[in-house]
Image (spheres, rainbow, N blue to C red):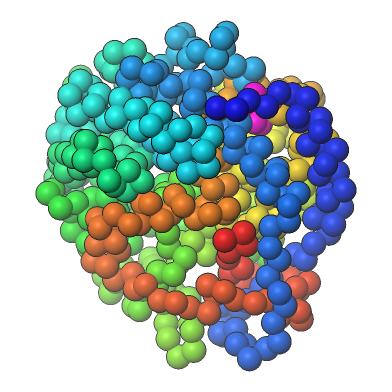
Amino acid sequence: MAGRGLGFVRKLTLLIRCGICCAALSGGPAAISATRPPDLDAPAAAVRPLRRVDIDLLDDLSRRSFRYFWEQTDVNTGLVMDRALARGSHGGRPDRQGVASIAATGFGLAGWCVAAEHHWISHEIARQRVLAALRLFTYTTPQQHGWFYHYLDPETGARAWQSEVSSIDTALLLAGVLTARECFHNDPDIVDLATNIYNRVDFPWMMDGSQMYFSHGWTPEKGFLRYRWNTYSELLILYVLGIGSPTHPISPRTWDAWRLPIVGVGGYTYVGGGPLFIHQYSLAWIDLRDRFAEEPPAANPTVVRLDSLLPRRNYHLNYFANSVVATRAQQELFSKQLSREFSGYSRNVWGVTASDSTKGYTDWGASPTDGRIDGTVVPSAAAGSLMFTPDICIPAMRTMLVRYGTKVYGRYGFVDAFNPMTGWVSRYVIGIDMGITLLSAENLRTGSVWQWFMNNPEPERALDLVGLLSIRHPLENYQIPPSLLNSQPSQKDFVLRLGQAGK
């Protein structure tokens, strides 16, 4: 892979300084009332395309994020390290002091596809890296009913750290497996291995007798974990894969059976209750931009009803639109409220999600009143939402790079976290944060990850079974009326300006 040194960072910051002010002052979120459909006859403003300076920034960020997988993947096993030093390890080799993560490996499988598509590496090298991982998970790595341990020895694939057989981490791995299967659909070896890995997973087994909810995992020492995936979170990918399974499916009735916590932040209301990554991980693969259900399940009173997005029709919660709102809500919280307490926060320096901190790994950001927030910024909060809200996330990436430079931006892109008030900077980057940055940027630029994953028949089948209709709705190419460009959302508004720029 062609490398870019820190000198390029300095050149890049000079290149993008000219765009920082106009980007920061570009039109704010457009509010579309949930109580009435948009005026489709209103005069339309042109959708802002990605500028050359934006594309350059995204390209550099994506290349550096991919470099993590290039350097922190074991060539023989295909396993990706859970974390690494932000400066990189000696000689560009994986850091053997840690463990591999199956979730990071899932992101890595999609990353090989992205890299081959952009010719950062050859198609054959990407193919060999994918095959190494698929062979390991087919023949070598221990599994229970098709489910894999959360952490593995990067050189052998053996269970590490007495970790659990993880339902959600296996799901993120499988998302990468199916992405690679479609990307390399003309390769019979990859197709067969990937299909066997997915078809082997016994989804009902992981429900441990429940008719509705997956367990978080299982260990040979204590059996199933008592926690359940019964509240909205990153669980969407888990249920899509389970419902769509051709060999061991679960009931479509499980969809939307989970609780939907309502969160209000400033002028925004959305379904949330967790760090920002819960809105990002599943939707990096599942394309729900045009999927709506006509009626919510009658047996589930917790479903959030929205008035029509189309005239004379009713649909319940669209998770993509909800993720757009969740991102905008966090940016507003940090820029207008938390900035009064922490001077490092601003309109373009914002965001936390689960990350390192001065007190260790912290799953902060679930609530606007989270007392653990201390001025720390987690770049993957904004980077992982590039596919949702490029108009606020690209300026955030640009400002952090220009303002803090090589202190926070290096070999693998942004460090995991930093505190602009105290000067603290994490020494590490984390594989899943590199992965969501890469996939979100790619979906914004090309939509390729969405396309690869959704071209598999199983996810499509799952969405059909749960009643999510594929509808070409007005929001797909919606042009924002000029009168709305500077309007402020009311408490019940859902911001629905979708990230179509750059397609």
Depth check: 473 or 92 in front?
92
**Residue at 62% in and 20% down:** 86
Query: Does residue 106 appear left or right of residue 199 in this picture?
Result: right
Depth check: 230 or 412 in front?
412
- Total count of labels: 0
Q: Is residue 362 visible?
A: no
Q: Using the rendered view, name the quadrant where residue 425 is placed.
A: top right
Characterize the magenta stretch by its predominant secondary structure: strand
Q: Is residue 204 visible?
A: yes
Q: Which quadrant is the C terminus positioned in?
A: bottom right
**Residue at 29% in and 13% down:** 156
**In this view, 485 is above or below 87:** below
Q: Using the rendered view, name the quadrant where residue 59 is placed.
A: top right
Depth check: 8 or 195 in front?
8
Q: Where is residue 400 shown, x and y percent of the image? A: 76, 38
Q: Which quadrant is the N terminus positioned in?
A: top right
**Residue at 63% in and 25% down:** 3
**In this view, 486 is above or below 237:** below
Q: Where is residue 187 shown, x and y percent of the image? A: 26, 41
Q: Where is residue 82 shown, x and y percent of the image? A: 45, 23
Query: Does residue 338 appear left or right of residue 473 in this picture?
Result: right
**In this view, 240 is above or below 381:** below
**In this view, 460 is above or below 470:** above
In magenta, the rendered stretch is 410-414
Q: Where is residue 469 shown, x and y percent of the image? A: 34, 73
Query: Does residue 477 appear left or right of residue 304 in this picture?
Result: right
Depth check: 47 or 100 in front?
47
**Residue at 12% in and 49% down:** 247
311 inside magenta stretch: no
